Image (spheres, rainbow, N blue to C red):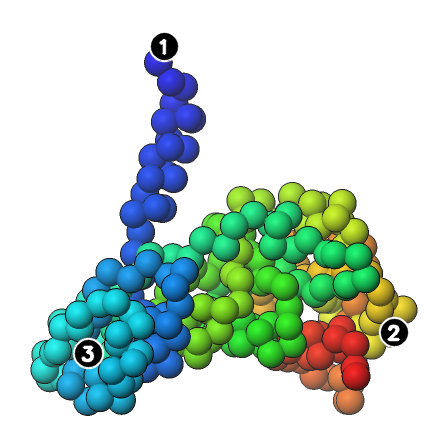
Amino acid sequence: MKKPRWVVDKERAKAAEASQTVWLFGLHAVRDALANPAREKLRLVLTRNAADRLGPEVLAAGGLEPEIADPRKFPAPLDPGSVHQGAALEVRPLDWGKLVDLCAAPPGEAPRVILLDRVTDPHNVGAILRSAEVFGARAVIAPRRHAAPETGALAKTASGALERQPYLRVQNLAAAMQTLREMGYVLFGMDGEADMSLAAACAEQTEQPLGIVLGAEGPGLRERTKETCDRLVRIDAARGFGSLNVSNAAAVALFAATPQK
C-alpha cells in the first residue's frame, strides 16, 4: 500500500532533521560541548593556541582527535564574522526528550519554564538560556518554526548554558502551553499593556508550577498565544516610558518568579 504524501513528507523532514549538524565555535561553547556526554560530536578544528587553552583533559573528554589548523586559514565553515577564538566543533543538535517528562512537577515542587513566541534572534535566545540556567528554570520552550534554531551564534551567547539548560523545540506552541496547563502549570504572558504587574501576580502565585511566556520584540505575543495564557502581566517601569528587550525581560521575570530564600 502506498503511503500518503503527508506521511512521506513527514518522514523526510524527520530524516533531514536527524542528519542536521551544527558548528559550535568559541572556547566556552566548545569546551562545554566536549564535556557533555549527551552531545554527539563529529569534527573538532582547533588552532594550536586554542588546543593549549582547552587543555589535554578537555580534549580527552571529547573523544575526538582535533584537526590543528593555521589561524590564517581556519577551515571550519563558519560565517566570516564569527569570533571563533580558534575553536570549532561540529555536532548534532541535542535531544531533550518530551515536554511531559522534562516539565513534570513532583509533589511539593513548583518548577518554572520559559516559553518563547517567535523569538528568532539567536543572541536573545542564548542570553535567555543563560538566565534560565542561573534561576533554575526547567526548560526554555520554543516552536520549531519561526524561532531561533540551535546555532553556533546561539551557543556562543549562551556561554555553555546550551549544554545544560534544556532548549525544547515543539511543533505547536499553543498546544504545548495547553499541555502544561493540563500538567498544573499557570501561564503568565508578558504584555506591556497588561492590567496586572508581574510582581503582584508572582506574589499570588508561589506554589503552582509557572510558565512565563514572552514574545518577539515589536510584535509581542500573538493573539492565540495571549488567549492560551491564564493571565497577562507587565513589568513596571520606574518612569512613564521604558521597555526591556526580550532577554532582559526574561531575566527580570525569572527573578521575580523565583522564591527568595
Measured as percent of width and height from the top left, residue 182 is found at: 76, 45
Label 3 to label 2: alpha-carbon separation: 50 Å
Q: Residue at x 60, y 79 (%)?
A: 134
Question: Where, by quadrant of the figure, is residue 194 drawn?
Answer: bottom right
What residue did someone put label 1 on?
1
Type of amino acid at the residue the image marks with label 1: Met
Looking at the rendered image, the quarter that the N terminus falls into is top left
- Which quadrant of the figure contains the C terminus? bottom right
Q: Secondary structure at mark 1?
A: loop
Q: Is residue 145 left or right of residue 209?
A: left
Q: Quadrant of residue 11?
A: top left
Q: Earlier in the sequence, mark 3 or mark 1?
A: 1
Q: Residue at x 73, y 84 (%)?
A: 241
Residue 5: x and y in percent read: 38, 23
Q: Helix, strand or loop at disc 3?
A: strand
What label does residue 203 carry, if any? 2
Q: Residue tagged by mark 3?
A: 46
Q: Answer yes or no: do the residues labelled 3 and 1 have beta carbons within 8 Å?
A: no
Q: Amino acid at mark 3?
A: Leu
